Amino acid sequence: MGDSGEYSSQFFGEAVAEFMRLPGVGRKSAQRYALHMLGRPIEERKRFIAAIQRFLEEVQHCPECHGLSDDGGVCSICASRSRDRAILCVVADTRDVMAIEHSQSYRGLYYVMGGLIDPMQGIGPSQLPIDQLLSTIVGKGIREVILAFGATMEGDTTQFYLQRCIAPTGVTISQPARGVSLGENLEQADGMTLGTAFAQRVVINPGSTVERNVKKADQTR
């Protein structure tokens, strides 16, 4: 971290040190951010500070999907009546929700697991909200669950485990098309790639002998 004693202004040095706490931000980038903010009009700086303060004080996790919401209430996606409430997309992280929403390729609901099964990191099924996920599927009358995880060992392990847990509910279980390269994280995929992967998603219910494209099922809803 930067030492505020390196600069003629102690407060500038403290700002640089705080910027350096952000992921991927080194000393030069932190200095550039601090100088940029210093050069902005005072009203713009006040708006920036107010936005950060509101974010830190008010943004919490939605009690229904575990995504982001204001004041701890139900998020705008869960509350929306324009979404397809028969489809639930299960993702690992809030960033995945942001990536999918940005692609404008999906209009159903979400459920954020908050992580993946990773024995190397000591994260097993008991550390994930699987029971709440199952309650959501049954309680909301979900008809299709899309398991949308990155192409990693942890993602595949989590998907396989959830398939077995969800199967007894009788819902359709699907995944984005694997023939489309999504990479290790959904947030790394561009909007067109995500859109294609969701449009061409396939059924992966345990015991299925053939993966079926679910596009026709969407058209009948």
Image (spheres, helix red, strand yellow):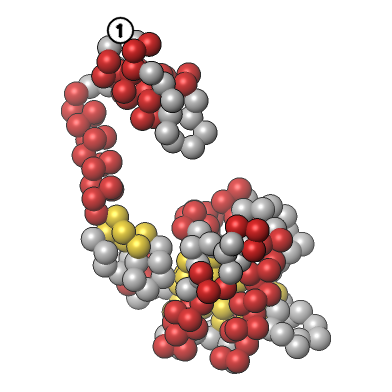
User: Is disc 1 surrounded by few (<14), some (14 to 19) or many (20+) residues within 10 Å?
Assistant: few
Question: Residue at 31% across / 59% down in the picture?
Answer: 60
Question: Residue at 37% across / 23% down in the picture?
Answer: 16
Along the line of sight, the residue nearer the viewer: 53 or 85: 53
In the image, taking residue 125 as reference, residue 69 lies left or right, namely left
| Vertical position of residue 203 compared to residue 191: above or below | below
Q: Position of residue 191 (x, y in %)?
A: 58, 52
Is residue 25 at least partly visible in the picture?
yes
Q: Which quarter of the picture shows residue 61?
A: bottom left
Return the residue at label 1: 8
Quarter containing the N terminus: top left
In the image, taking residue 156 as reference, residue 99 lies left or right, namely left
Question: Residue at 51% across / 70% down in the picture?
Answer: 128
Disc 1 residue type?
Ser
| Vertical position of residue 64 compared to residue 103: above or below | below
Along the line of sight, the residue nearer the viewer: 183 or 8: 8
Question: Residue at 56% across / 81% down in the picture?
Answer: 144
| Vertical position of residue 71 compared to residue 11: above or below | below
Tag 1 secondary structure: loop
Is residue 33 at least partly visible in the picture?
no
Q: Position of residue 27 (x, y in %)?
A: 47, 21
Q: Which quarter of the picture shows residue 80?
A: bottom left
Along the line of sight, the residue nearer the viewer: 81 or 31: 31
Q: Position of residue 109 (x, y in %)?
A: 45, 72
Number of numbered callouts drawn:
1
Quarter containing the C terminus: bottom right
| Vertical position of residue 174 compared to residue 183: above or below | below
Q: Position of residue 141 (x, y in %)?
A: 46, 88
